[in-house]
Amino acid sequence: MLELPTLDQKSYAQIFEEAVARIPALSPQWTDFNPQDTGILLLELMAGLTEFQRYYLDQAGEEFLLCYLRLAMGREVPREELEQALLDFAQESGSPSRAVTPGDFSALIRALPLGITHVQTCFQNGYAQVTVYRLHSPLSAQEMQILEAELDYRRLIGSKIQVEQAVLQEVSLDCQAELDPSPGSEDRFRSRMARLFEDYLERNPFQRAFRMEDFRAEILEFRELRRLESLSLRPVTAQPLLRSAAGSSQVLRLASIQISPIPPKGVPHG
């Protein structure tokens, strides 16, 4: 018996979310997304109808599917090729043909043979603002043109796209601390700081203004630490750390951890 793939691949919530995500690009002046808004009500109704139609796609028999594929693919599909044709059609229809949500942008960009490792998309003032980063080397001007052309082809009619490349910034994490004098405490403290910092960067790959307080409290819980006098981040290169939200995005990479003892009271330092 023919095992049909699942064509009903999106829930009501996903369909509705994609519809709402189109609003900033197509109608920036529409800012009320609350349920009492008439437009939102219409989107909810259409999302429900779409889900209803998708559900019945999975209830169809072979005769209907052959007719449906002939209409969708523009050619006759032999009965013996129905299973493969359905698999191909389901895979094609399941991938975004137009970038609508941030997830769509990420999927389309990662599918390009450019080796991009980080993607961030947000919608603001009618623009889809896309930030990309590649781990081992920056994208060339030609590769950026390929990326922009692909996104321009996939964008919704009337929407606008702005693409920027994040800058790699190598940093050193410096602290002045009093540690437990037991053997190996400094190595353990350094290792735990590195893991904590890398976890933070994994959760927040793109930095505009670094917030040390986001994980300072966790460092204070380390059992190897008796007292923490200062904790700072400094660039390894001459390029200053980006502080303004209006500046370019950056990807931080931890180059080193510097630990210095706290000077005794009354002894000048610095």
Image (cartoon, rainbow, N blue to C red):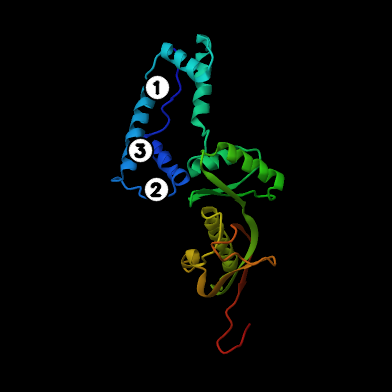
Q: Quadrant of residue 42?
A: top left
User: How many other residues sit within 10 Å of disc 3, few (<14), some (14-19) or many (≥20)?
Assistant: some
Tag nearer the camera, 2 or 3: 2
| Residue 92 locus on image (x, y percent) | 53, 27
Q: What is the C-alpha distance between the residues marked 1 and 2?
A: 33 Å
Residue placed at 63% from the left, 40% from the top? 149
Q: Residues within 10 Å of mark 2 (few under 14, many from 20)?
A: few
* Mark identifier at residue 57: 1
Residue shown at the point (32%, 48%) measured from the top left: 34
Residue under the image location 62 percent in, 38 percent down: 112
Question: Pointer 2 and pointer 3: residues touching (CB < 8 Å)?
Answer: no
Most extreme residue toward the bottom is 266
Determine if residue 9 is in view.
yes
Quarter of the image where the C terminus is located: bottom right
Q: Quadrant of residue 194?
A: bottom right
| Mark 2 or mark 3, earlier in chain | 2
First in sequence, mark 1 or 2: give its number: 2
Mark 2 lies on a secondary structure that is loop
| Image spot of residue 137 (x, y percent) | 70, 50
The answer to whether 225 appears left or right of 116 in the picture is left
Q: What type is the residue that disc 3 sits on?
A: Leu
Q: Which mark is residue 30?
A: 2
Q: Position of residue 188 (x, y in %)?
A: 57, 63
Q: Nearer the viewer, residue 173 or 219?
A: 173
Neighbourhood count class around disc 1 (C-alpha, 10 Å): few under 14, some 14–19, many 20 upward: some
What is the spatial separation of the Cα atoms under label 2 and label 3, in whole angstroms? Answer: 13 Å
